Image (tube, coloured by chain):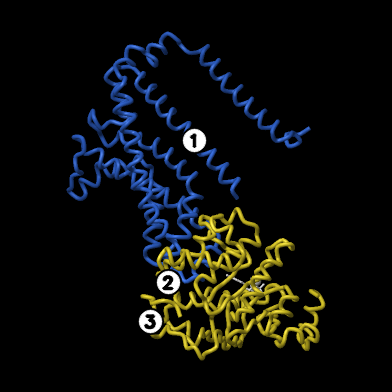
Amino acid sequence: MTLTDIRPTVRRRIARLSSYTIALIIVVILAFIGDWPRMGRQFFNFEIMKKIFPSIVTIALRNTLIYTVIAFVIGTFFAIILALMKMSKGPAHWFAVGFIELFRGLPALLTIFGCAYMIPIAFNFHWPSIGGSQGVAAGLTGLILVTSAYNAEVIRSGIEAVPKGQREASRSLGMSHIETTVYVILPQGVRIVIPPLTNEFVMLLKDSALLFIAGATVKTRELTTFGRDGMTSNMNATPFVCAAILYLLVTIPLTYLVGRLEKKMAVKK
Amino acid sequence: MSPANPKLHERDTPDPSAPPIQVIGLHKHFGTNHVLKGIDLTVNKGEVVCVIGPSGSGKSTLLRSVNLLEWPTGGKVYIEGIDVQDPDVNLDYVRTRIGMVFQQFNLFPHMTALRNTTIAQEKVLGRSRAEAEQCGRDMLERVGLEDKIYAHPSQLSGGQQQRVAIARALAMNPDMMLFDEPTSALDPELVGEVLQVMRDLAQSGMTMMVVTHEMGFAREVGSRLIFMDDGVIVEEGLPRDVLANPQHPRTQAFLSKVL
Ligand SMILES: Nc1ncnc2c1ncn2[C@@H]1O[C@H](COP(=O)(O)OP(=O)(O)O)[C@@H](O)[C@H]1O
Ligand SMILES: [Mg+2]
């Protein structure tokens, strides 16, 4: 009997069981080889937890969410324009192609670094200070560039997934190219694009960790910067572990939501 | 005539004495694929012209060329006397004069049946919401769907969707209607309700061009039958003559296969 002979439900159960087993084995190995008293002191130090709570939530997590939402909203706005440009003909198309390839091809860390340190030098220019730091505006600009490039591709494929007949029906009623795009194509593209865009939101939330390179003040730190500062000032990794747990508390439910949305979309078709 | 239209220019004004559709020497290439090879066709007011022919013979392309969903690579298309390829002509306005019904219905799935019928009235003809809804309701009633006004396309049967599509086209108050195999995607038991709507429409004097495989409909409703093959009009005439007594061997071969 080969693997394909097994019923899909059974196969899925076996797959889930084996992944649980692997996780369990890793935990057991860690438990045997790990130095537990030392790990407790270094990673789950209760005294340090008391020091960093609640500001790790009220400042750091809050900033992470605010930065992610701002970069996502503005980035998606530009992404729609970029997607429409890429689907057009002429110079706008080539601008969009160049922009998208550039910022999808560069590591996000480099883009943020460039915004924070290279652009000010190259153009002799200062980012506006937000919360006492220029890093916020520079870093957010970097995130917006990256996100608009990624989301532009997601949105373009969503728009192209709308059946051709929709545009033809709309044009045959006398609606212009722009009216057709706005009232017929985009509303349908949005529905198609919601699950992959939620996915991009999760990626962006994790990429917001890269803002640490742009620099931040006490009030403008996001989770990773907060964790790193806490680690260096306390000589202890507990702040990092707490930051990691907070990331997972947000990303895992969102990833689960993406799965649910995708299933719902699949049923509708 | 339609209400005052801000987009309408004098040169777009239809000539009431001109035939609704006039196609002269029409050619269409897709790359190296020569699909229409010189089509000459005039459809007069109130005529119901049925087009039959084997798959791939260019029937859809001909229909789509009439409202310029496909741009001809040679020849002329006149709609109510207007040269639609003239770059100064407002093509969007010309298209409002031509209703089109597709094989796959192509209703807007994110809108109710009523909204499907009103969106273009508002955006293109500049009608108010109330005016557009009144007209949309009237048209949905005309196709027998007054109880499905707020249904979304996914909640309707194929036959109902196609009738909404007809109502959507009629709501623009067009002077002519193009049908591209309107019943080919339907389950057999739903074909009748759509053909009945089309029959009523023909009886009301609408100028129609219908690509169809429904020979019964063509015989009963058509004022003229055109047989197309390989990008040319092979034979045309009164439907009952062409169907009962085809002159051309290609017509005979085609009809012996489908009848
Ligand atoms: N958009 C297009 N691009 C390229 N070829 C096309 C396109 N539309 C139609 N064709 C080709 O034109 C020919 C005629 O197609 P069509 O007009 O749809 O025929 P029919 O409606 O009679 O079945 C076919 O060979 C088809 O492959
Ligand atoms: Mg066809």
**Residues packed near mark 2 inside 10 Å, few (<14), some (14 to 19) or many (20 plus):** many
| Chain letter, colour blue in render | A
Chain B: colour as depicted: yellow
Residues marked 2 and 3 touching at CB (< 8 Å): no
Looking at the rendered structure, the secondary structure element under dot 1 is helix
Q: Look at label 1 and name its amino acid.
A: Thr
Tell me which corner region of the image, top left, top right, bottom left or bottom right, holds residue B252.
Answer: bottom right
Q: Provide the residue designation for mark 1.
A: A255
Do pointers 2 and 3 mark residues of a single chain? yes
In the rendered image, residue B174, in percent from the top left (x then y), is placed at: 52, 76
The residue that appears at 40% across and 70% down in the rendered structure is B126
In the rendered image, residue A208, in percent from the top left (x then y), is placed at: 35, 36
Looking at the rendered structure, the secondary structure element under dot 3 is loop
B258 in relation to A163, above or below: below
Q: Provide the residue designation for mark 2.
A: B125
Do pointers 1 and 3 mark residues of a single chain? no
Report whether the residue tagged 3 is closer than 8 Å to ligand 1. Answer: no
